[in-house]
Image: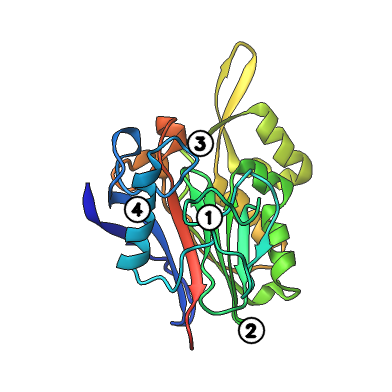
Amino acid sequence: MSDSAEILHPTWNVPEHVKAFVSLRKGGYSLGRYEGLNLATHVGDNNEHVERNRQLLTKQFSLPKQPTWLNQTHSTKIVELLSDQKELASNHKELVAEADGAWTQLNNQVCAVLTADCLPVFFYHHKENKVAVTHAGWRGLLNGIIENTITEMTSTPEYLEVWLGPAIGAEKFEVGEEVRAAFCDLDNESEQCFKFVKEVENKRYYLADIYQLAKRRLYNSGVTSISGGDFCTASDPRRFFSYRRDGETGRMVNLIWMSEQ
């Protein structure tokens, strides 16, 4: 147990009033399979430990308010955070919305998504002063979570700045032929994002590059300024939780908000 936490800051071109970070595993109060700073209540961890972890995060890193915690379901739904947004109950049993991303144009509204291999995608709009963060696993990517986020935020995607946070790397993310085929049916150039690795009982398996799949969706949506994408959660147990690596495990949180300018 530790009364301190560690975070990772994006490396991207945004003004100082845009605040964003990813929590790392080290620190916090969770034990066993969840050891470290687990921020998720839905994974089987002791809720008292999770509550202490959330309080630690808010206090140590001076969040303007508690993050808006979402009930993530690998959907393509995005929620806008407004000034009258209903706060999460203190016992964390009441969730604001079922969604896999949040955006806002208001100051001090903390957007958050939880991840442990899926890709967190951070957005800032330079002209309209808006921020967003999206939870993009392969299902979300395939079904249009990135496109939905952009459409919800703006009609001028060319002014978006995007950072791709920690996700499972291309050497660890094994998928079946059906996943590869689903992406290639929508965009045949997605084939370059998959590498054949083996065939077992007439079933072919590939390594998928979730970062490149996301970049293709972003570029095709009109986004040109993209950074990040050089992590592997499954290969770094000291810093990151990984569902693919460990099964029962914790979650990191990916936060973005705007302070007063």
Farthest-out residue, left: 2
Q: The disc labelled 4 sits on which kind of residue?
A: Asn
Proximity of marks 1 and 3: CB atoms separated by less than 8 Å: no
Q: The disc labelled 1 sits on which kind of residue?
A: Val
Mark 3: few/some/many CA within 10 Å (<14, 14-19, 20+): some
**Mark 1 or 2, nearer chain start:** 1
Front-most of residues 17 and 15: 17
Task: Tell me the SS state at disc 2.
Answer: loop
Distance from the alpha carbon under mark 1 to that under mark 3: 20 Å
Is any part of residue 240 visible from this angle? no
Nearer the camera: disc 4 or disc 3: 4
**Mark 1 or 3, nearer chain start:** 1
**Mark 4 or 3, nearer chain start:** 4
Check the image and report above or below for 13 versus 6: below
* Residue under pointer 1: 113
**Mark 2 or 3, nearer chain start:** 2
* Residue under pointer 3: 173
* Residue under pointer 2: 127
Nearer the camera: disc 2 or disc 3: 2
Farthest-out residue, top: 201
Give the percent coordinates (x, y) of residue 63.
Answer: 41, 70
Distance from the alpha carbon under mark 4 to that under mark 2: 35 Å
Q: Residue at x 38, y 48 (%)?
A: 50
Distance from the alpha carbon under mark 4 to that under mark 3: 29 Å
Give the percent coordinates (x, y) of residue 132.
Answer: 59, 66
Q: The disc labelled 2 sits on which kind of residue?
A: Lys
* Residue under pointer 4: 53
Q: Is residue 166 left or right of residue 69?
A: left
How many discs mark residues in the rendered view?
Answer: 4
Q: The disc labelled 3 sits on which kind of residue?
A: Phe
**Mark 4 or 1, nearer chain start:** 4
